[in-house]
Amino acid sequence: MRITMQSIHKNILTNLNTITTSMGRINAQISSGKQMATISDNPVNLVTALGLRTSLSQITTYQNNLTFGDKTITAAESSLTQMKDIVLRAKTLGLQLANASVNPQNRASAAEELRHLWEEAITLANSDVNGKYIFGGYRTTGYTDIEPEPFIADLASGYRVVGKALPDLAAAAATQYNLNTGDLTINGVPISATVADASSTTHADASAAARATAINNATGNTGVSATITPAYHSAAGAVTLGSLGTNDLVINGQDIFNGVPIATNADPSATVALDADNVLINAINAKSGSTGVIASRNAAGIMSLSAVDGRNIQITTTANGEAVTQFNGAATSRVYFGTVQLSSDHPFTLQTTTVTEPGLVALGLDGGAATTNEVNDIAADGLLTVNTIQKKEGNVRYAGDPDHDLAIKVGRNSTLEVSKNGKAAVSDTAIFSMLKKMQESLLGQKYTSVTGPNKATDTNAKLDSGSTGLERQDTPFINGAITFTVTDHSSSPPTNRVMDIGVNIATDGLADVATRINGIPGMTASWDANGQLKLESTDAERYSFAYSDSSNFMEMSGITQDIMQVQAIQQATGDSDTVMDSLSTQISDFGARANRIIVQLQIFSQLEMATTENLSEKEDTDITEALLQLKAKETAYQAALAAAAKTMQLSLVDFLT
């Protein structure tokens, strides 16, 4: 094949352009420091480099997350440490002021300091990093005007609704307060029919115990639990003079005046006005082991009965029995019911049949907003949504996420927990309740327990016998009354029940009076093995009590207002040790989390270095190699030019010849 000079010239130019292009590319690599400017430079390397760049970006994100986590942990440790210092200060004040010689002004001044410490603890619990609450759980942001922060003072925890008192029923009446299948759903979960409790004698499937059990059996699915307010009933009038015998008074199936189980329980038994000689009250309480009912009596001679475990109270009276006791208002058999309170950490909804609303009737929640205090609750619509945040003075509401801890992303499918949610890390240490309890005890408020320091030798001896072991020459037992005020803090505002216990020194022994106190809902009273009187609320979170006494009974047992205050301060001081231990545990836990952060930071630092090196190998120019290549290209270019010149020169001579 004949090759023309034109073809030769074209090839020379093409080759020279190729060398020039290569030289330009190498020069660009040297100038930019990068091997690739376009995809065509090295498609395989470019794809790999892009993948490595993505990995580096992710690594940087995870490192930023870890840095945030480290700051969060540091802030949490600092907050918890400062809380521990607050508790230590509260303990110091408690030790100083748990002394009968301290005057009320000093205690009031210390109480004001405790209030500030309590508020400071709340502020520390609401600490944030970069605008994100460290103890908010998953709810680090997104708070509202109602819940502006994770921890809010003077609001109730969770959501709750309290059923109203249920009207008593005739024993033979149709059951109205039980739950049948389909009567009630809570959060979309059907509640099973109530099952008769093992204690109530009538309407046993409608007792507070039965209703609470049905609801609590589904708590795992609904998140809603029920607590019981025991049945309580007061007579319509005072005990009158008379005589009670067989069948005149039957309580929960037990005939009270049939001569059994105590020898003094004659049949018939004579009663005096106001039951001043304790015949009626002692007979009822003698059978409380069978009935589950404790009797009490105020100074006016009006009897009251309280169930101890959520069972119903069935009272059956004859005409004679009613004339003496006035329990039922007429000779009949009546049943008295306790109520239930529903509570949950989250808003919840109850649904039932409309109009009649059997599910709500059973819980005492029918009647709309007037009953439930839920402003959007409409009577007879079959629906109740409980979402109102109630006030509760002295409480600290946790509005963060109580179910999840704050976690950061450290991998495509991996997270690392850095901070516990505030319920677990702060609220459960009981720091807020301890500080508030200390403040209240310094102010002489909200007592929940007291033990008399004086020791009785015979709790059955009559108060005027001189044989109780509590006698004092300067302060004798006298006829009078102990008036107790029991405050139920489960509603807002709290409700008070005032009950006065009559004391007759000729007929009462120490145990008699304690038994009657024990019949007050929300309180228990007993003489311990050392002969000391102990008073307690049945639920320290819900009930507190105060008293006044005109009989000297409390003072003779050693219980005075000052003793109650000193013991409350001592108890709060003792609780402070438990709180400090809990806070120390939390601080240690955060220390362990900090160590995990350090390890992860080291891992990602090494990974960043390795990835950066790999990326450099794929995209950065090796300057030495590039210079050698450029030199080689220059040499080739010069040689090509020389060859081209000779070729073109020869071709011109040939052309001329």
Image (cartoon, rainbow, N blue to C red):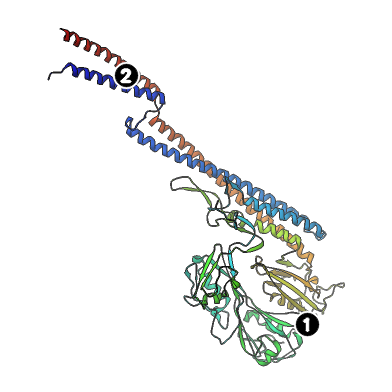
The 10 Å Cα crowd at callout 1, few under 14, some 14 to 19, many 20 or more, is some
- Quadrant of res 576: bottom right
The residue that disc 1 covers is: 507
Tell me which residue sits at (79%, 67%) in the image.
560
SS type, badge 1: loop
Amino acid type shown at disc 1: Thr
* Of the two numbered discs 1 and 2 in the rendering, the one whose residue sits closer to the viewer: 2
- Quadrant of res 229: bottom right
The total of numbered circles placed on residues is: 2
The location of residue 51, given as percent across then percent down, is: 39, 38
- Of 86 and 496, which appears nearest the observer? 496
**Residue that extends furthest to the front in the rendered view of this protein:** 656
The location of residue 287, given as percent across then percent down, is: 66, 82
Which numbered disc, 1 or 2, marks the residue that appears first in the sequence?
1
The location of residue 649, given as percent across then percent down, is: 22, 10
Q: Is residue 189 left or right of residue 239?
A: left
- Of 495 and 383, which appears nearest the observer? 383
Residue 445 in view in this figure:
yes
The location of residue 291, given as percent across then percent down, is: 62, 81
- Using the numbered discs, state the Cα–Cα distance from disc 1 to disc 2 in whole angstroms: 124 Å
Quarter of the figure that contains the N terminus:
top left
Tell me which residue sits at (17%, 8%) in the image.
656
Amino acid type shown at disc 2: Lys
Mark number displayed over residue 633: 2
Q: Is residue 82 left or right of residue 358?
A: right
Tell me if label 1 and label 2 are in contact, CB under 8 Å: no
- In the displayed structure, 286 sits above or below 647; it is below
The 10 Å Cα crowd at callout 2, few under 14, some 14 to 19, many 20 or more, is some
